[in-house]
Amino acid sequence: MNKIILLLYLLSSCNIISAQSISRQANLAQQYLDNRGEVYFSFQLNDLSQLSTLSRIISVSNVQGNTVFAFANQKEYSDFLTYNIDYTVLTAPSELYAVKMTENSRQTLS
């Protein structure tokens, strides 16, 4: 009996942690959408045949094995959520490096 109670407790704890992670990802995605107008994220697909359907909804930028990397605006993101696929919000590649600006075109060659 104690083992069953312990198992139920552990399972409910995992569900709470999972729900918190999903909520954290959704909040982070919304911050990117509010600030940049788009969100960059990755997700796993066990069945890559879904990719053709999803690529009509979101902008797929790369696929590495079963991991898909994509961009979405608010509408695309909302449509993607209807598929109930777990995802991870990522920093957009354009935000990874500082861009050096110049007014002198000769400096761009160096």
Image (spheres, rainbow, N blue to C red):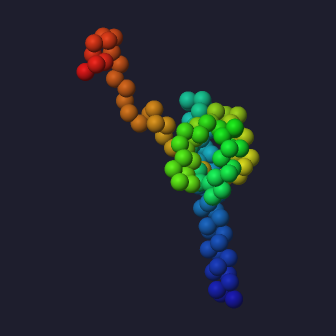
User: Which residue is at 64% across, 33% downward?
Assistant: 73
User: In which quarter of the view is residue 32 placed?
Assistant: top right
User: Which residue is at 53% across, 42% downward?
Assistant: 62
User: In which quarter of the view is residue 27 placed?
Assistant: top right
**Quarter of the image where the C terminus is located:** top left
- Residue 84 in picture, x, y percent from top left: 70, 52
**Quarter of the image where the N terminus is located:** bottom right
User: In which quarter of the view is residue 36 placed?
Assistant: top right
Q: Relative to 62, does residue 37 appear above or below in the rendering?
A: above
Camera-nearest residue between 86 and 5: 86
User: Which residue is at 62% across, 74% downward?
Assistant: 10
Q: Residue reaching furthest top? A: 104
Q: Relative to 4, does residue 103 appear above or below in the rendering?
A: above
Q: Relative to 36, does residue 49 appear above or below in the rendering?
A: below
Instruction: Decide if residue 40 is in sight here.
Output: no
- Residue 66 in picture, x, y percent from top left: 57, 54
- Residue 19 in picture, x, y percent from top left: 64, 57
Q: Residue reaching furthest left? A: 110
User: Which residue is at 66% across, 40% downward?
Assistant: 55
Q: Residue reaching furthest bottom? A: 1
